[in-house]
Image (cartoon, rainbow, N blue to C red):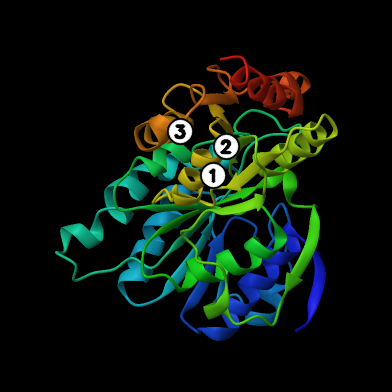
Amino acid sequence: MATETLSIGKALNAGLRRALENDPKVVLMGEDIGKLGGVFRITDGLQKDFGDQRVIDTPLAESGIIGTAVGLAIRGFRPVCEIQFDGFVYPAYDQIVSQVAKMHYRSQGKVRIPMVIRIPFGGGIGAVEHHSESPEAYFAHTAGLKVVSCASPQDAYSMIQQAVASDDPIVFLEPKRRYWEKGPVELDAPLAEAYPLHSARVVRPGTDATVLAYGPMVRTCLDAATAAAEDGRELEVVDLRTLSPLDLSAAYESVRRTGRCVVVHEAPGNLGLGSEIAARITEECFYSLESPVLRVTGFDVPYPAARVEEEYLPDLDRVLDAVDRTFGW
């Protein structure tokens, strides 16, 4: 089986190419995704190879992009919409919550909305206002939407194809500061044999504490686990991968073995995903816990200016500090 070393960005491009090849009803839509290939070049070369009727440069109007995609989905197409930056999704929020999430329910199951909304999310690229956000909780809270986030090239390649093939509307969160990180990708692996889309996965086994993360924070937590191992402490890192529906089966199994848990995400802590995850783990694993479930998150402030964003983002030291605190109970 052919394995190539690709960046997350190139793996997404390859996955989208495979989806376009496999289904003539797949249509890509977004601002500057055609000739330019998108601001992060995720769709580079796709309009040249598949034409401007399938890789469509849209007006700068996010609400219009999503609204048009809803109509296309109802008519049997599988639109894949790119939101250029996470902070640009809010003009489309009404369409996503009022139409995309509710059409299947509203029609008593007669109408499906098989569409993907791709959102580069998170910080770490030194961007200006509206270009670094973590909006996942808005969508994970909305019944009728599914929300996933990839963290490795292999997952980027397979998960984007699985999302496109799904009959449900999926918000696909891409960790923008990890676009250039590379890893092995099995390009010829059958999609049916890929790891399930809505399942979490242990990405580093350990015995002393469980660290849960998704998207851009998975790499941070893996680096923290490497550092902790130098001091003789083995951290188990779980990549959640799916935020709605949440799959915490791997987390429960891990916490019952380690007795300690730290949840990490870039979004602010107030009513973030970490709150729900901590509550569920406490409910399910109460008698196994040796300490409270702790959270390492962004701060409850608007995303700061680029020159101080490294003070805002959870880093290796903050993760390790939280792990240390779990051993202090």
In percent of width and height, residue 299 lies at 58, 18
Q: Which amino acid type corresponds to the residue marked 1 in the rendered image? A: Ser
Q: Which residue is mark 1?
A: 254
Q: CA distance from mark 3 to mark 2?
A: 8 Å
Mark 1 or 3, which is nearer the eye? Answer: 3
Q: Is residue 215 visible?
A: no
Q: Which amino acid type corresponds to the residue marked 3 in the rendered image? A: Ser
The N terminus lies in quadrant: bottom right
In percent of width and height, residue 105 lies at 19, 58
In percent of width and height, residue 129 lies at 63, 28
**Residue in the picture at 47% in, 49% down:** 62
On screen, residue 114 versus residue 195, left or right, reads left
**Residue in the picture at 59% in, 24% down:** 298
Q: Helix, strand, or loop for circle 1? A: helix
**Residue in the picture at 51% in, 25% down:** 290
**Residue in the picture at 85% in, 33% down:** 230
Q: CA distance from mark 1 to mark 3?
A: 10 Å
Q: Could you tell me if the residues under marks 1 and 2 are in contact, i.e. CB atoms within 8 Å?
A: yes
Q: Which residue is mark 2?
A: 258
Q: How many marks?
A: 3
Q: Which residue is mark 3?
A: 288
Q: Could you tell me if the residues under marks 1 and 3 are in contact, i.e. CB atoms within 8 Å?
A: no
